[in-house]
């Protein structure tokens, strides 16, 4: 196997013959010359079986991690993975992201050890491209997905090469982001008193801090936020505002490349962003935003927002570099969470995609 340094240096050619970097019992191929993701398929029965696959992955973990940095994403296809328990065995080959979903924007149901359900974002809507927990100082270095059941129509997990997006940012926009950084303001409601649980389909701002931080003790929330460099502001009604300030570009821990990492490009809190939602869903969210003491939003460090034109520039870059393909049952996709953004196309019918967070 080539060394990590060689694999990374060859990435500018996108490892067009990626199979030479893989053992002979698997083969690698890409969708096109962009090179992300790299699909890896078994070439022998012994590697295809669950036990054989886990053993193969354990023996080749250094190569897997090197190829992940080179390509940004890997898809393991054709291996005998059938259910959350099987997926959990593969996830545990890697170091887990210990923070998990504490302080996260969505409710996540745990399906197996270190395995969670994917975002339950409304099926008719496209989940925009983003890096997982791009609203936090600390974030999972890698995100891993498993397809148990593809949607009947649509529902592809889309990805995007953030190296390319960063490279293509207009100079003036990049300098603006570098100069000001990003301030992420999020609100949590007070814990419910009506006996209801927070719904996975609700807007993140409609979720309580009890659910978001997995505790009903304010002191524990304060401790978690202090450790994660989050500023807290409690309100008379028991709700909570959390603010996180950080740079818009993050150095990769291995290659030291500066990569754009933020959600400031997402238009989440305007009437335009909510326009596709049914009126019965949209109006309570708009009322909630109106009544917030500190308005949720993703701002530049000086408190201003990107202009509509700048958001459109980001959208055009993401559209340019977006990649998607049809899920197949048993597919596992491993992403470098800094180098590759992910999202989801709208879908129809039942869909079961599972996810894990890794260091």
Image: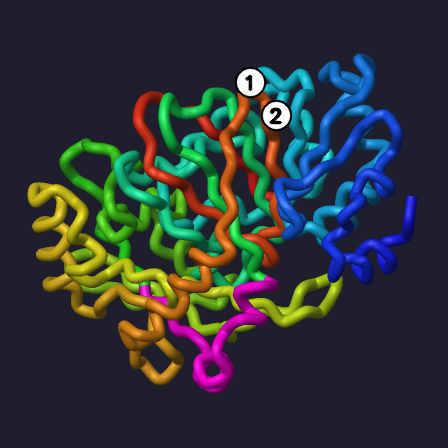
Q: Residues within 10 Å of mark 1 (few under 14, many from 20)?
A: some
Q: Which residue is label 2 attached to?
A: 87
In this picture, residue 76 sits left or right of residue 298 = right
Q: Across the whole image, how many numbered discs are drawn on residues?
A: 2
Magenta: main secondary structure equals helix
Q: Which mark is residue 83?
A: 1
Distance CA(mark 1)–CA(mark 2): 6 Å
Q: Position of residue 100 (x, y in %)?
A: 52, 44
Q: Position of residue 253 (x, y in %)?
A: 70, 63
In this picture, residue 126 sits left or right of residue 148 = left
Above or below — where is 350 with respect to 97? above
Local secondary structure at mark 1: loop
Residue 167 lies within the magenta run: yes
Q: Residues within 10 Å of mark 2 (few under 14, many from 20)?
A: many
Local secondary structure at mark 2: helix
Kindly check if marks 1 and 2 are in contact, taking CB atoms under 8 A apart as contact.
Answer: yes
Q: Residue at x 88, y 29 (%)?
A: 24
In this picture, residue 189 sits left or right of residue 299 = left
Residue 206 lies within the magenta run: no
In this picture, residue 155 sits left or right of residue 62 = left
**Colour scheme of the picture:** rainbow
Q: Position of residue 283 (x, y in %)?
A: 8, 50
Q: Position of residue 299 (x, y in %)?
A: 34, 74
Q: Residue at x 81, y 38 (%)?
A: 19
State the residue in front, 148 or 346.
Answer: 346
Location of residue 344 by image quarter: top left
Q: Magenta residues?
A: 163-185
Q: Residue at x 30, y 36 (%)?
A: 200
State the residue in front, 145 or 313.
Answer: 313
Above or below — where is 181 with respect to 275? below
Q: Which mark is residue 237?
A: none
């Amino acid at each position: 196997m080539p060394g990590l340094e060689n694999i990374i240096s060859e990435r500018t050619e996108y490892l067009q013959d990626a199979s030479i970097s893989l053992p002979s019992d698997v083969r690698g191929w890409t969708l096109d010359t962009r090179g992300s993701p790299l699909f890896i398929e078994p070439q022998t029965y012994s590697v295809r079986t669950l036990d054989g696959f886990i053993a193969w992955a354990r023996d080749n973990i250094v190569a897997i991690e090197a190829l992940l940095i080179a390509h940004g994403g890997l898809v393991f296809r054709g291996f005998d993975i059938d259910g959350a328990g099987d997926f959990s065995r593969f996830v545990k080959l890697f170091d887990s992201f210990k923070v998990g979903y504490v302080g996260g924007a969505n409710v996540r149901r745990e399906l197996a050890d270190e395995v969670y359900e994917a975002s339950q974002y409304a099926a008719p809507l496209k989940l925009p491209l983003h890096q997982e927990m791009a609203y936090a100082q600390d974030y999972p270095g890698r995100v891993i997905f498993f397809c148990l059941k593809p949607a009947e129509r649509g529902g592809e997990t889309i990805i995007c090469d953030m190296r390319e997006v960063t490279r293509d940012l207009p100079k003036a926009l990049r300098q603006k982001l570098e100069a000001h950084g990003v301030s992420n303001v999020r609100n949590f409601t007070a814990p419910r008193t009506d006996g209801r649980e927070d719904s996975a389909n609700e807007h993140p701002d409609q979720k309580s801090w009890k659910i978001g931080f997995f505790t009903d003790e304010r002191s524990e929330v304060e401790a978690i936020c202090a450790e994660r460099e989050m500023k807290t502001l409690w309100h008379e009604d028991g709700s909570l505002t959390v603010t996180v300030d950080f740079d818009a570009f993050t150095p990769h821990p291995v290659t030291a490349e500066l990569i754009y990492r933020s959600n400031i490009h997402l238009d989440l809190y305007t009437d335009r962003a909510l326009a596709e939602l049914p009126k019965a869903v949209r109006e309570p969210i708009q009322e909630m935003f109106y009544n917030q003491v500190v308005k949720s939003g993703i701002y530049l460090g000086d408190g201003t927002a990107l202009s509509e034109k700048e958001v459109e520039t980001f959208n055009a870059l993401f559209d340019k570099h977006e990649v998607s393909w049809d899920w197949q049952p048993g597919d596992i996709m491993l992403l470098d969470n800094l180098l590759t953004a992910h999202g989801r196309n709208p879908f129809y019918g039942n869909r079961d995609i599972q996810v894990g967070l890794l260091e």
